[in-house]
Image: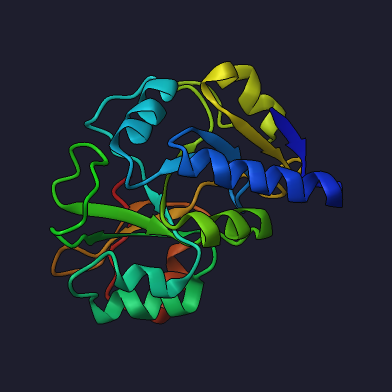
Amino acid sequence: MLYDCRSLAERDRGIAAAIEAVKNGELVVLPTDTVYGLGADAFTPYAVTALLDAKGRGRHMPPPVLVGSRHTLDGLVLTLPQTARDLVEAFWPGALTIVVEHSPSLQWDLGDSGGTVAVRMPLHPVALEVLQETGPMAVSSANKTGQPAAVTAEEARDQLGYAVRTYLEAGPCPDPVPSTIVDLTGDVPRVLRAGAIPLEKLRDVVPDIVGAVS
Protein backbone atom coordinates (compact mmCIF):
# COMPACT_ATOMS: atom_id res chain seq x y z
CA MET A 1 0.00 0.00 0.00
CA LEU A 2 1.17 3.52 -0.78
CA TYR A 3 0.87 6.29 1.83
CA ASP A 4 1.26 9.96 0.93
CA CYS A 5 3.42 11.35 3.73
CA ARG A 6 2.78 14.90 2.57
CA SER A 7 -0.57 14.54 4.37
CA LEU A 8 -0.03 14.62 8.15
CA ALA A 9 -2.65 11.97 8.97
CA GLU A 10 -1.50 9.66 6.18
CA ARG A 11 2.14 10.25 7.17
CA ASP A 12 1.48 8.92 10.68
CA ARG A 13 -0.41 5.90 9.34
CA GLY A 14 2.24 5.22 6.74
CA ILE A 15 5.15 5.39 9.17
CA ALA A 16 3.32 3.07 11.58
CA ALA A 17 2.61 0.64 8.72
CA ALA A 18 6.23 0.75 7.56
CA ILE A 19 7.56 0.07 11.07
CA GLU A 20 5.19 -2.88 11.45
CA ALA A 21 6.16 -4.25 8.02
CA VAL A 22 9.89 -4.07 8.80
CA LYS A 23 9.41 -5.77 12.16
CA ASN A 24 7.46 -8.53 10.36
CA GLY A 25 10.33 -9.11 7.93
CA GLU A 26 8.60 -7.43 4.98
CA LEU A 27 9.93 -4.85 2.51
CA VAL A 28 9.23 -1.12 2.51
CA VAL A 29 10.07 1.79 0.23
CA LEU A 30 10.91 5.05 1.96
CA PRO A 31 12.27 8.47 0.96
CA THR A 32 15.84 9.47 1.75
CA ASP A 33 17.81 12.62 1.05
CA THR A 34 19.27 11.05 -2.11
CA VAL A 35 16.94 8.59 -3.89
CA TYR A 36 14.11 6.39 -2.62
CA GLY A 37 15.27 3.31 -0.76
CA LEU A 38 14.05 -0.28 -0.65
CA GLY A 39 14.44 -1.41 2.95
CA ALA A 40 14.30 -4.46 5.19
CA ASP A 41 15.30 -5.34 8.74
CA ALA A 42 19.08 -5.80 8.64
CA PHE A 43 18.88 -8.58 11.25
CA THR A 44 16.27 -10.72 9.45
CA PRO A 45 18.17 -12.78 6.85
CA TYR A 46 15.08 -13.83 4.84
CA ALA A 47 14.04 -10.16 4.60
CA VAL A 48 17.47 -9.21 3.24
CA THR A 49 17.21 -12.09 0.76
CA ALA A 50 13.78 -10.80 -0.30
CA LEU A 51 15.31 -7.35 -0.84
CA LEU A 52 18.05 -8.76 -3.07
CA ASP A 53 15.50 -10.86 -4.97
CA ALA A 54 13.20 -7.86 -5.50
CA LYS A 55 16.09 -5.91 -6.99
CA GLY A 56 17.31 -8.87 -9.06
CA ARG A 57 20.66 -8.76 -7.29
CA GLY A 58 22.88 -11.54 -5.92
CA ARG A 59 24.63 -12.00 -2.58
CA HIS A 60 27.84 -10.65 -4.11
CA MET A 61 26.35 -7.13 -3.84
CA PRO A 62 25.29 -6.79 -0.17
CA PRO A 63 23.06 -3.78 0.58
CA PRO A 64 24.18 -0.82 2.68
CA VAL A 65 22.70 -0.30 6.13
CA LEU A 66 20.86 2.85 7.19
CA VAL A 67 20.80 3.92 10.84
CA GLY A 68 18.67 6.42 12.71
CA SER A 69 21.40 7.91 14.92
CA ARG A 70 25.16 8.29 15.05
CA HIS A 71 25.28 6.27 18.28
CA THR A 72 23.91 3.20 16.49
CA LEU A 73 27.19 2.97 14.60
CA ASP A 74 29.08 2.13 17.80
CA GLY A 75 26.92 -0.97 18.23
CA LEU A 76 27.79 -2.26 14.75
CA VAL A 77 31.59 -2.12 14.91
CA LEU A 78 34.30 -3.36 17.27
CA THR A 79 36.48 -0.28 16.83
CA LEU A 80 35.76 2.86 14.85
CA PRO A 81 38.74 4.65 13.27
CA GLN A 82 39.12 8.31 14.23
CA THR A 83 38.74 9.23 10.56
CA ALA A 84 35.29 7.58 10.62
CA ARG A 85 34.29 9.57 13.70
CA ASP A 86 35.50 12.80 12.09
CA LEU A 87 33.58 12.16 8.86
CA VAL A 88 30.42 11.13 10.71
CA GLU A 89 30.63 14.26 12.86
CA ALA A 90 30.97 16.43 9.76
CA PHE A 91 28.50 14.82 7.35
CA TRP A 92 25.86 12.81 9.24
CA PRO A 93 22.98 12.87 8.82
CA GLY A 94 23.62 13.30 5.12
CA ALA A 95 24.79 11.82 1.86
CA LEU A 96 27.92 10.07 3.11
CA THR A 97 28.21 6.28 3.26
CA ILE A 98 31.18 4.85 5.14
CA VAL A 99 32.51 1.30 4.76
CA VAL A 100 33.80 -0.13 8.04
CA GLU A 101 34.51 -3.56 9.51
CA HIS A 102 31.43 -4.73 11.39
CA SER A 103 31.53 -6.61 14.67
CA PRO A 104 31.86 -10.38 13.99
CA SER A 105 29.28 -11.08 16.71
CA LEU A 106 26.41 -9.41 14.82
CA GLN A 107 23.57 -11.80 14.03
CA TRP A 108 22.96 -10.71 10.47
CA ASP A 109 23.59 -11.89 6.92
CA LEU A 110 23.75 -9.10 4.37
CA GLY A 111 25.37 -11.25 1.71
CA ASP A 112 29.01 -11.80 0.80
CA SER A 113 30.25 -8.75 2.67
CA GLY A 114 33.72 -9.94 3.67
CA GLY A 115 33.17 -8.69 7.21
CA THR A 116 32.51 -5.10 6.19
CA VAL A 117 29.36 -2.98 6.04
CA ALA A 118 28.47 0.26 4.29
CA VAL A 119 26.59 2.52 6.74
CA ARG A 120 24.76 5.82 6.36
CA MET A 121 22.46 8.04 8.40
CA PRO A 122 20.08 9.77 5.96
CA LEU A 123 18.92 13.35 6.28
CA HIS A 124 15.18 12.81 5.79
CA PRO A 125 12.58 13.12 8.58
CA VAL A 126 10.42 10.23 7.36
CA ALA A 127 13.36 7.84 7.02
CA LEU A 128 14.74 8.85 10.42
CA GLU A 129 11.38 8.38 12.12
CA VAL A 130 11.12 4.84 10.74
CA LEU A 131 14.75 3.97 11.53
CA GLN A 132 14.53 5.19 15.10
CA GLU A 133 11.81 2.57 15.71
CA THR A 134 13.09 -0.30 13.58
CA GLY A 135 16.82 -0.08 14.26
CA PRO A 136 19.36 -0.65 11.44
CA MET A 137 17.82 -1.43 8.06
CA ALA A 138 19.37 -2.92 4.96
CA VAL A 139 18.48 -0.35 2.30
CA SER A 140 19.30 -0.19 -1.39
CA SER A 141 17.98 2.10 -4.12
CA ALA A 142 14.31 1.33 -4.82
CA ASN A 143 14.62 -0.01 -8.36
CA LYS A 144 15.28 -3.17 -10.30
CA THR A 145 18.98 -3.65 -11.03
CA GLY A 146 19.78 -1.93 -14.32
CA GLN A 147 16.74 0.36 -14.16
CA PRO A 148 16.79 4.06 -13.19
CA ALA A 149 16.73 4.80 -9.44
CA ALA A 150 13.24 5.81 -8.32
CA VAL A 151 12.82 9.46 -7.32
CA THR A 152 9.24 8.95 -6.07
CA ALA A 153 7.52 6.06 -4.30
CA GLU A 154 5.15 5.86 -7.27
CA GLU A 155 8.10 5.17 -9.59
CA ALA A 156 9.39 2.55 -7.16
CA ARG A 157 5.99 0.84 -7.10
CA ASP A 158 5.97 0.69 -10.93
CA GLN A 159 9.22 -1.31 -10.76
CA LEU A 160 8.83 -3.36 -7.58
CA GLY A 161 5.05 -3.89 -7.36
CA TYR A 162 3.77 -6.41 -4.82
CA ALA A 163 7.25 -7.39 -3.62
CA VAL A 164 6.96 -4.41 -1.25
CA ARG A 165 4.42 -4.22 1.58
CA THR A 166 4.47 -0.45 2.27
CA TYR A 167 5.41 2.53 0.11
CA LEU A 168 5.97 5.92 1.73
CA GLU A 169 5.55 8.78 -0.75
CA ALA A 170 7.10 12.16 0.10
CA GLY A 171 7.26 13.69 -3.37
CA PRO A 172 10.16 13.82 -5.80
CA CYS A 173 13.69 13.68 -4.40
CA PRO A 174 14.99 17.28 -4.39
CA ASP A 175 18.53 16.25 -5.33
CA PRO A 176 18.66 12.64 -6.60
CA VAL A 177 22.44 12.26 -6.51
CA PRO A 178 23.70 9.08 -4.81
CA SER A 179 25.68 9.26 -1.61
CA THR A 180 29.46 9.44 -1.64
CA ILE A 181 30.97 6.14 -0.45
CA VAL A 182 34.23 6.18 1.52
CA ASP A 183 36.13 2.99 2.41
CA LEU A 184 37.69 3.24 5.87
CA THR A 185 38.87 -0.36 6.17
CA GLY A 186 42.38 0.20 4.77
CA ASP A 187 45.38 2.23 5.87
CA VAL A 188 44.25 5.24 3.82
CA PRO A 189 40.63 6.45 3.48
CA ARG A 190 39.48 5.98 -0.11
CA VAL A 191 36.46 7.20 -2.06
CA LEU A 192 34.79 4.18 -3.69
CA ARG A 193 32.00 6.16 -5.36
CA ALA A 194 31.91 9.88 -6.06
CA GLY A 195 28.54 11.32 -5.10
CA ALA A 196 26.72 14.16 -3.39
CA ILE A 197 29.65 15.17 -1.15
CA PRO A 198 32.61 16.31 -3.27
CA LEU A 199 36.18 15.21 -2.61
CA GLU A 200 37.28 18.74 -1.64
CA LYS A 201 34.79 18.81 1.25
CA LEU A 202 35.93 15.39 2.44
CA ARG A 203 39.56 16.59 2.36
CA ASP A 204 38.64 19.51 4.60
CA VAL A 205 37.98 16.86 7.29
CA VAL A 206 40.37 14.05 6.25
CA PRO A 207 43.21 15.60 4.21
CA ASP A 208 44.81 12.29 3.15
CA ILE A 209 41.66 10.79 1.59
CA VAL A 210 42.19 9.30 -1.88
CA GLY A 211 39.72 10.05 -4.68
CA ALA A 212 37.75 7.47 -6.62
CA VAL A 213 39.44 5.79 -9.58
CA SER A 214 37.69 6.98 -12.74
Q: To which quarter of the image does residue 77 belong?
A: bottom left
172 sits left or right of 9 in the view:
left
173 sits left or right of 122 in the view:
right
Quadrant holding the C terminus: top left
Q: Nearer the viewer, residue 35 or 213?
A: 35
Identify the residue shown where x is 42% and y is 52%: 194
**Residue 17 at x, y percent in the picture:** 64, 41
Q: Is residue 94 above or below residue 214?
A: below
**Residue 128 at x, y percent in the picture:** 59, 60
Identify the residue shown where x is 38% and y is 51%: 65
**Residue 111 at x, y percent in the picture:** 23, 37
194 sits left or right of 75 in the view:
right
Q: Nearer the viewer, residue 135 or 78?
A: 135
**Residue 122 at x, y percent in the picture:** 54, 59
Identify the residue shown where x is 66% and y is 48%: 16
- Please tell me how many numbered marks the rendered image carries: 0
